[in-house]
Image: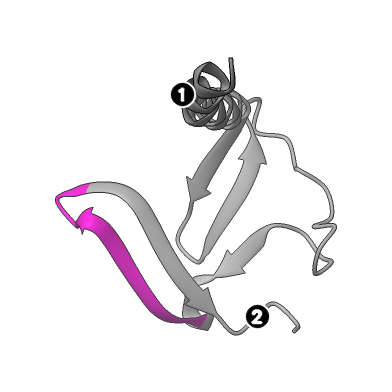
Amino acid sequence: LKTRITAYFPGALLSLFGLFLCFQTATLRFTFDESEFSLVRSDLSSTGENVVVGGENRWRYEQFVNYEFFPSESFPILVYFKETQTPE
């Protein structure tokens, strides 16, 4: 029984993470305009205040100090950016 549990545990964790990503994909959107990047709900309404650092989930492009596309800019799956607008 112990080997069965240890055999299925990593798969169960990966499945839960996959469900979390599906939920986030269905409920959130990124919007881009001339001066800002925003995280909004799928109906384009505000996500409200960021509970971790405060403030709305909007970032001005001029505040970006570093960004990277993974695996590449022509096929971005993950986009990393560092900005100075959010208080520490």
Q: At 60% from the left edge and 85% from the top edge, which residue is drawn?
A: 84
Q: At 48% from the left edge and 54% from the top edge, which residue is drawn?
A: 33
Quadrant in which the C terminus appears: bottom right
- Going by the numbered disc 2, the residue's amino acid type is Gln
The CA span between labels 2 and 1 is: 45 Å
Where are the magenta residues, as a range?
A: 64-75
Judge whether 39 appears above or below 87 on screen: above
Viewer-closest of 33 and 24: 24
Q: Which residue is mark 2?
A: 85
Is residue 63 rendered to the left or right of residue 86?
left
Viewer-closest of 12 and 40: 12
Sequence-wise first label, 2 or 1: 1
Is residue 77 rendered to the left or right of residue 33?
left
Residue 57 lies, in percent from the top left, at 69, 57
Residue 58: within the magenta? no
10 Å crowding of disc 2: few (<14), some (14-19), many (20+): few
Q: Which residue is mark 1?
A: 7
- Going by the numbered disc 1, the residue's amino acid type is Ala
Q: Return the mark for residue 58.
A: none
Judge whether 36 appears above or below 13 on screen: below
Residue 9 lies, in percent from the top left, at 55, 27
Viewer-closest of 59 and 23: 23
What is the secondary structure assignment of the residue under circle 1? helix
Taken as a whole, is the magenta stretch helix, strand or loop?
Answer: strand
Does the CB distance between marks 2 and 1 fall below 8 Å? no
**Quadrant of the rendered image containing residue 58:** bottom right
**Quadrant of the rendered image containing residue 24:** top right
Q: At 76% from the left edge and 43% from the top edge, which residue is drawn?
A: 47
| Extreme residue toward the left, this view | 74
Q: At 52% from the left edge and 44% from the top edge, which residue is drawn?
A: 30
**Quadrant of the rendered image containing residue 1:** top right
